[in-house]
Image: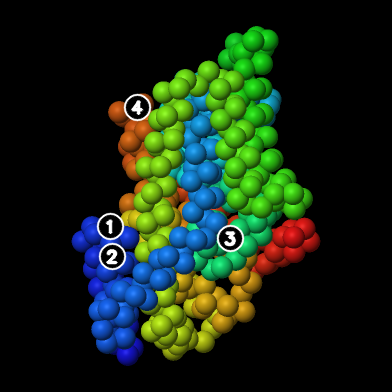
């Protein structure tokens, strides 16, 4: 049985490295595994079709499309530019103010869109040109854009948190709240780094002069307030509604989407923009939904085969020291993060690693936040960090190199991992707030 399990999991890895779509790979190995155990194709198809039907009945198939649509409405409204300008106004007296504004603005935008790669692509076009024009070094500017995009995955509504909650059958609301304190700590660490870097390297992050600061034109300020504060308001509706118990995650997603739609109309979004947003949300959501169905089949196969226990036994055979086991999990996530996106990593590994963490006595909420942080750090890891390649493709500067982005992102990568380890060592950072409120 053990050799068969590892043979099927090895086949899954082969499919992935051959470029087979993850949903096809998961569905295929699940069908092969279940059919082999049940001894018949008909029984295997019956079990997997029932699993797919049960997964389709979950609320996540409403929540994810609504949050994605909310992010698309916000993106097309042009509010990202207003948010960045508003953050710039708020922090312009600080050393490295554009770096701080990029961290705050990018994190909020990543949270509202639910995808760090989309936020990195957007702020590469918004923040980078202005930072370089005002004398900031390319390396610092690029690293700030790439690093701060990861922060949004800890701020609700996060698609990664929703997917994790579905796979582990945790409360989506609890997981949303669990990310707030670690997210605040990481945001402060990022901002602190930007300020310290600017003080120690004034040539690379110069203080803005009176000529550099835009005049407070009332019309411009009014537009920036509408766009910037509206985004904060949407996040407030989602978090506040769930926090106060007034809204379920599904209802919060609905109110957030309606608010984003009204914001888009107020900002001049056309009928064509609305239709394109709906089409784009469907195009983004459909693959995620298919992946979730395939992942539910994969989880059923793992449960039926006892694969989780086999892998747990194997990890403890390597070492009974929990630190070593967690180190192996950590290394796998960092390695996978260099090659594939965060959602795919969670779908592949969480059904296996979450039970292992439970066996080790790690709190499920703390392990979730730890995992999301490490997986996001993997997107910045050389030589194939996907987030770095996204920034490279998005910046309007042909002279930017991958080396510049990787070197600029290293401090942020280190800070992400430091906070991840803090969450693991001090679980209360992620468990105190949801246990107090919910």
What residue is rendered at 32% in x and 90% in y? 1
Q: Which quadrant, please, contains the C terminus?
A: bottom right
Q: CA distance from mark 2 to mark 4?
A: 37 Å
Which residue is label 2 attached to? 25
Crowding at dot 3, Cα within 10 Å, few <14 / some 14-19 / many 20+, comes out as: many
- The secondary structure type at the circle numbered 1 is loop
What SS does tag 3 mark?
helix
Q: CA distance from mark 2 to mark 1?
A: 6 Å
Q: Which residue position is annotated with label 1?
A: 21
**Label 2 close to label 3 by CB (< 8 Å):** no
Mark in the foreground, 3 or 4:
3
Q: In percent of the image, x 27 and y 87: which residue is there?
A: 39
Residue that carries the numbered disc 4 in the rendered image: 397
- On screen, residue 259 above or below 403: above
**Disc 2 to disc 3, how far (Cα)?**
27 Å
Does the CB distance between marks 2 and 1 fall below 8 Å? Answer: yes
Whether the residues at callouts 2 and 4 have beta carbons within 8 Å, the answer is no
Q: Residues within 10 Å of mark 1 (few under 14, many from 20)?
A: few
Mark closest to the chain's N terminus, 1 or 4? 1
| Residue 62 point in image, percent of width and height | 52, 50
Q: Is residue 64 visible?
A: yes
Q: Residue 390: x percent and y percent?
A: 37, 41
Residue 223: x and y, percent?
Answer: 62, 17
| Cα distance between the residues tagged 3 and 1 | 27 Å
244 or 126, which lies in front?
Answer: 244
Q: Nearer the viewer, mark 1 or mark 4?
A: 1
Front tag of 3 and 1:
1
Mark 3 or 4, nearer chain start? 3
Q: Earlier in the sequence, mark 2 or mark 3?
A: 2
């Amino acid at each position: 049985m053990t050799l068969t399990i590892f043979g099927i999991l090895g086949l899954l890895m082969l499919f992935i490295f051959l470029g087979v779509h993850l949903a096809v790979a998961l569905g295929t190995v699940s069908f092969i595994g279940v059919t082999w155990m049940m001894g018949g194709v008909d029984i295997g198809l019956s079990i997997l079709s029932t699993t797919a039907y049960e997964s389709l009945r979950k609320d996540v198939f409403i929540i994810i499309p609504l949050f994605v649509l909310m992010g698309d409405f916000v993106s097309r409204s042009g509010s990202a530019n207003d948010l960045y300008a508003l953050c710039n106004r708020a922090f312009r007296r600080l050393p490295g103010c554009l770096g701080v504004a990029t961290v705050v603005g990018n994190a909020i935008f990543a949270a509202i869109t639910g995808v760090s790669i989309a936020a990195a692509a957007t702020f590469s076009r918004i923040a980078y040109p202005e930072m370089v024009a005002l004398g900031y070094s390319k390396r610092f500017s690029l690293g700030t854009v790439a690093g701060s995009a990861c922060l949004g995955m800890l701020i609700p509504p996060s698609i990664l948190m929703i997917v994790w909650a579905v796979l582990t059958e945790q409360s989506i609301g609890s997981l949303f709240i669990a990310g707030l304190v670690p997210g605040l700590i990481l945001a402060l660490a990022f901002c602190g780094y930007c300020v310290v870097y600017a003080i120690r390297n004034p040539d690379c992050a110069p203080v803005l002069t009176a000529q550099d600061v835009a005049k407070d034109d009332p019309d411009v300020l009014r537009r920036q307030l509408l766009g910037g504060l509206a985004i904060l308001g949407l996040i407030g509706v989602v978090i506040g509604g769930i926090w106060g118990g007034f809204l379920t995650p599904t209802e919060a997603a609905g109110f957030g989407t309606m608010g984003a739609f009204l914001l888009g109309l107020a900002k001049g979004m056309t009928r064509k923009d609305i239709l394109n947003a709906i089409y784009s949300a469907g195009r983004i959501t459909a693959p995620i939904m298919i992946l979730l169905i395939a992942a539910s089949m994969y989880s059923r196969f793992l449960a039926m085969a006892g694969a989780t226990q086999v892998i747990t036994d194997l990890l403890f055979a390597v070492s009974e020291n929990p630190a070593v086991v967690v180190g192996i999990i950590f290394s796998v996530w960092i390695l996978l993060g260099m090659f594939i996106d965060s959602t795919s990593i969670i779908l592949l590994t969480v059904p296996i690693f979450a039970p292992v963490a439970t066996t080790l006595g790690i709190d499920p909420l703390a392990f979730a936040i730890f995992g999301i942080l490490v997986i996001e750090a993997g997107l910045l890891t050389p030589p194939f960090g996907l987030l770095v390649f996204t920034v490279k493709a998005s910046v309007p500067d042909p002279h930017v190199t991958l080396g510049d982005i990787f070197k600029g992102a290293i401090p942020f990568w280190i800070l992400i991992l430091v906070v991840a380890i803090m969450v693991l060592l001090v679980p209360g950072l992620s468990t105190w707030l949801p246990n107090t409120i919910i």
